[in-house]
């Protein structure tokens, strides 16, 4: 951080920012090493350490800026290294590649071609912005991640950080700030999509001596890590948004509720708050304006239900994270009975951009009812997994195929789950659906916080619904009967389906239980829990019928409804299936057809996955009556 005394007024801040900007050469070479969780798992920390050593040894340490940044988004190809300002993007970089990058690119001005992205035509792509994964995105909130060291406030301020806060507290009234956010059309990115400005206005209205603003960073959806990516990579953007919200609403205290499982996010946020207090941008009489504001970080215990607003506030109060009845809104009586405004990480991170660039700029992005961009975690059976930021209104097809690169192993697309456990599945004939709050809701799903799980033709939709209900059964707080018992009853029916013991009337039972839960459950967890089941029945009813009437799993997933056999005509006796079988159920001599003993087989699918693609000798028998005959025949013990 630049050496400076405490900032006592807006002029001090302006001078501080000017000093930082003037001390930087925009054309200076910089190396940005992604340190998001995905890249860290593939040793990006060691890549960074190697760069530090090699730059010193090569004599380039004074000429090149090295930064350990937050997530760049392209998690599938990590660790990633971007050389700025030319945006040369190297993927799957190992520590052993570092010396070559320094000698070839930083010193010699050349390109290490083998580390570049290769397009469908096999040709290398040099610039990050030309890679299809990035090319079709519009990075508004997430774009600065590769340019900011999350532990450097100078980096954030050099990119215009905290100018929105200064603008708000020195030139705008609280009412004007709220009006600007309201005019922008910003809707809550946590899942509900409630207009942020209206929530702020409702929280500021009741007479109260104390109000609170809260960041909901309790990101618990399976496969979702958007908020984590922002908090770890650019914590100041969230903090600045929260401070602006505090000023607008009349709050002097804010909370960041973040799950304990995000240690890097917690460390980066705590460090950012410490620096802000040191320079006078957090605490008493900020910049001499009379605005007092401080922030407390609360570490959550990892309960999914604590993402619900009232349950989260109960947890901050030191009580069990259980939801409260909503006949009184948290904007009137929330944390400690005081008016409280809660928004998620991405919502708060949008606020400084709106204050700096204006509501009209924000409204120019997105659709009529859903403004701005949205960050999604694109995961599942898709080639390019990672974090993507797109304008509201982009189609599912564009996200999955243009950005995601299509289905892994070029299999057939089947469905995409949006909105996590509270959302629903969307089939292939709806791939041209525009992704915004209203269209997803009309399709029987929801935006949620931004999880997007892609599924191929080998996915069983009944099993998918069961998976989400198992998750919700574990995560339900158990406070209300409709949720506690309703989820377990739905799960019991789905277990009958996947084991081949369900009846046709079970489909009607699912609908009855689901309707009761939607009408009677205390909070959003219980009310939305049936969504994955109902949407999968709506679009894939034939699969449910197959499980009931034919005792068959079309996806070949439900263990009770499948068995394995080896085609004698195709088997080349390579022995690969035999080596991976955990129970020694496969026998055979080398270069001779092998056999599976189904009495021993545990249906782990290892042999099916291991059999060479060009051979495909191991096959699944997917129909129960065939399985029964197969398993009870004399040949079963030897086949």
Image (cartoon, rainbow, N blue to C red):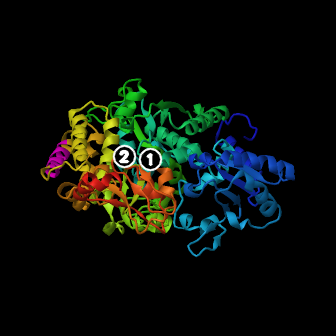
Locate the C terminus by quadrant: bottom left
What residue did someone put label 1 on?
584
Q: Is residue 592 left or right of residue 148?
A: left
Q: Distance between the residues labelled 1 and 2?
A: 8 Å
Q: Mark 1–mark 2 contact, CB under 8 Å?
A: yes
Which span is picked out in magenta?
506-516
Q: In which quarter of the image is residue 329?
A: top left
SS at circle 1: loop
SS at circle 2: loop
Residue 45 x %, y %: 67, 45
Residue 600, labelled with which disc?
Answer: 2
The residue sitting at 48% across, 33% down in the picture is 255
The residue sitting at 42% across, 32% down in the picture is 211
Q: In this view, does 624 lie to the left or right of 356?
A: left
For the question of whether residue 585 can be seen, the reply is yes
Question: Is residue 535 covered in magenta?
Answer: no
């Amino acid at each position: 951080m630049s050496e400076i005394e405490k900032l006592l007024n807006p002029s001090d801040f302006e001078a501080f920012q000017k000093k930082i900007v003037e001390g930087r050469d925009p054309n200076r070479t910089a190396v940005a090493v992604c340190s998001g969780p995905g890249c860290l798992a593939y040793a990006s920390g060691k890549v960074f350490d190697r760069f530090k050593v090699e730059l010193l040894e090569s004599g380039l340490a004074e000429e090149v800026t090295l930064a350990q940044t937050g997530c760049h988004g392209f998690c599938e190809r990590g660790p990633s290294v971007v050389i700025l300002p030319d945006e040369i993007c190297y993927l799957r970089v190992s520590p052993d590649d570092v010396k070559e990058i320094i000698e070839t690119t930083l010193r010699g001005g050349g390109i290490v071609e083998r580390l570049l992205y290769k397009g469908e035509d096999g040709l290398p792509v040099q610039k990050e912005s030309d890679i299809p994964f990035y090319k079709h995105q519009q990075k508004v909130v997430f774009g600065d991640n590769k340019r900011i060291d999350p532990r450097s406030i100078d980096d954030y301020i050099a990119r215009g950080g905290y100018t929105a806060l200064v603008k708000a507290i020195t030139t705008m009234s609280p009412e004007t700030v709220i009006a600007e956010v309201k005019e922008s059309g910003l809707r809550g990115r946590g899942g509900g999509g409630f207009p942020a400005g209206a929530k702020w206005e409702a929280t500021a209205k009741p007479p109260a001596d104390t109000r609170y603003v809260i960041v909901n960073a309790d990101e618990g959806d399976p496969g979702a890590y958007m908020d984590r990516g922002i908090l770890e990579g650019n914590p100041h953007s969230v903090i600045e948004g929260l401070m602006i919200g505090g000023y607008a609403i009349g709050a002097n205290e804010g909370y960041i509720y973040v799950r304990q499982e995000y240690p890097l996010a917690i460390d980066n946020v705590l460090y950012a708050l410490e620096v802000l207090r040191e320079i006078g941008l957090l605490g008493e009489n900020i910049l001499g304006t009379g605005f007092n504001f401080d922030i407390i970080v609360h570490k959550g215990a990892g309960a999914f239900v604590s993402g619900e607003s009232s349950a989260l506030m109960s947890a901050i109060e030191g009580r069990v994270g259980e939801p409260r009845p909503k006949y009184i809104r948290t904007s009137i009586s929330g944390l400690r009975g005081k008016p409280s405004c809660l928004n998620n990480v991405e919502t708060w991170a949008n606020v400084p951009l709106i204050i700096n660039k204006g509501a009209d700029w924000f409204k120019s992005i997105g659709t009529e009812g859903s403004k701005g961009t949205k960050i999604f975690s694109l995961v599942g059976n898709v080639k390019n997994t990672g974090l993507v930021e797109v304008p509201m209104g982009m189609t599912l097809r564009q996200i999955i195929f243009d950005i995601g690169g299509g289905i892994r192993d070029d299999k057939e697309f089947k469905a995409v789950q949006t909105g996590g456990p509270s959302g629903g599945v969307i089939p292939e004939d709806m791939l041209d659906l525009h992704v915004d709050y209203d269209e997803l809701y009309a399709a029987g799903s929801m935006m949620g916080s931004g999880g997007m799980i892609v599924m191929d033709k080998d996915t069983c939709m009944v099993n998918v619904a069961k998976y989400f209900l198992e998750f919700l059964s574990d995560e339900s707080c158990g406070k209300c009967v409709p949720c506690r018992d309703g989820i377990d009853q739905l799960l019991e029916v789905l277990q009958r389906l996947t084991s081949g013991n369900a009846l046709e009337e079970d489909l009607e039972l699912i609908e009855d239980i689901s309707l009761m839960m939607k009408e009677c459950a205390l909070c959003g967890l219980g009310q939305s829990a049936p969504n994955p089941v109902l949407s999968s029945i709506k679009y894939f009813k034939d699969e449910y019928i197959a499980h009931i009437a034919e005792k068959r799993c079309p996806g070949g997933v439900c263990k009770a409804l499948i068995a394995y056999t080896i085609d004698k005509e195709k088997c080349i006796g390579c022995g690969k299936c035999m080596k991976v079988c955990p129970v020694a159920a496969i026998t055979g001599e080398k270069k001779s057809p092998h056999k599976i003993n189904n009495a021993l087989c545990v249906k782990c699918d290892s042999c099916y996955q291991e059999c060479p693609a060009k051979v495909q000798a191991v096959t699944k028998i997917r129909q129960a009556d065939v399985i029964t005959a197969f398993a009870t025949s004399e040949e079963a013990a030897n086949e």
